[in-house]
Image (cartoon, helix red, strand yellow):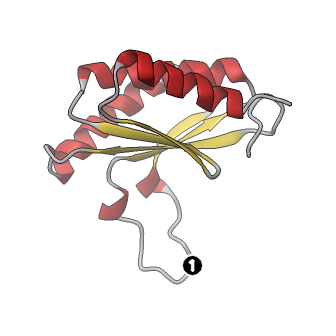
Amino acid sequence: MVNISTSDPADVSIALKSADLDDQQLDDTTRLLRTELLELDVERVVDARGQVAPEGTRGVGAELVGQLIVGMGPGLVALRQLLETVRSWRTQHHQVEISVRIGEDLIELTDASPETERQLVDAFIRRHASE
C-alpha cells in the first residue's frame, strides 16, 4: 500500500467511463475534470494518452480515453482535497462513473449515495495514512 502521508510523490490514476457518452464526449468530459484538478495543489494532471507507450506496443490510444494521471506530493490533506473535488465534480456529471487508483488500491464512485461515497473516500484515505 502506498503511504501518501510520508511517501515520495505518488501518481493517482483517475478513470472516467460512461455508457451514455461516446469517445469524443468522454474525452471532452475528461478535459473538464482535468481543468478543475489543475486548480488544486498537485504537481501535474496529464492525460494518460500523453504517457509513453509501453515497450512492445504500437502506442497509447483509444483505450486510455477518460484516464488521467495526477502527480501528488505527500500529504493526506492533498489526497482528501483531490477526492472531494472528484466527488463534487461527479455530482454535476452523474452519468460518469469514476475510479481512483493509488498503486493497487482502488475506489469507485458510481451510483452510491453521497453519504456512502463519503464513507468510501474516508476509508480510502485511512488506508493511505501512516501507521
- Packing grade of label 1 (10 A; few <14, some 14-19, many >=20) is few
Query: Can you name the residue that lies furthest to the bottom here?
Result: 56
Q: Residue 4, relative to residue 36: is it above or below?
A: below
Pick whichever, 55 or 112, lies toward us.
112
- Nearer the observer, 11 or 130: 130
Q: Residue at x 83, y 29 (%)?
A: 130
Residue at 54% x, 26% y: name it.
121
Residue appearing at x 18%, y 49% in the figure: 24
- Number of labels in the image equals 1
Question: How far from the left and from the top, in percent, is residue 82?
Answer: 53, 24
Work out which quarter of the rendered image holds the C terminus and state it. Answer: top right
Q: Is residue 42 visible?
A: no
Q: Is residue 3 left or right of residue 101?
A: right
Provide residue 23's location: percent of width, then percent of height.
20, 53
- Comparing 63 with 118, the one in front is 118
Whole-percent x, y for residue 41 in the image? 60, 21
Amino acid under disc 1: Glu
Quarter of the rendering containing residue 73: top right
* Residue nearer the viewer, 103 or 25: 103
Which residue is pictured at 31% across the width and 38% down the height?
A: 97
- Is residue 72 among what the camera can see? yes
- List the residue tagged with mark 1: 55
Q: Report helix, strand or loop for mark 1.
A: loop
Q: Is residue 20 left or right of residue 31?
A: left
Measured along the vertical axis of the image, is residue 43 above or below residue 50?
Answer: above
- Residue 72: quadrant of the picture: top right
- Residue 91's spot in the image, x, y percent? 29, 20
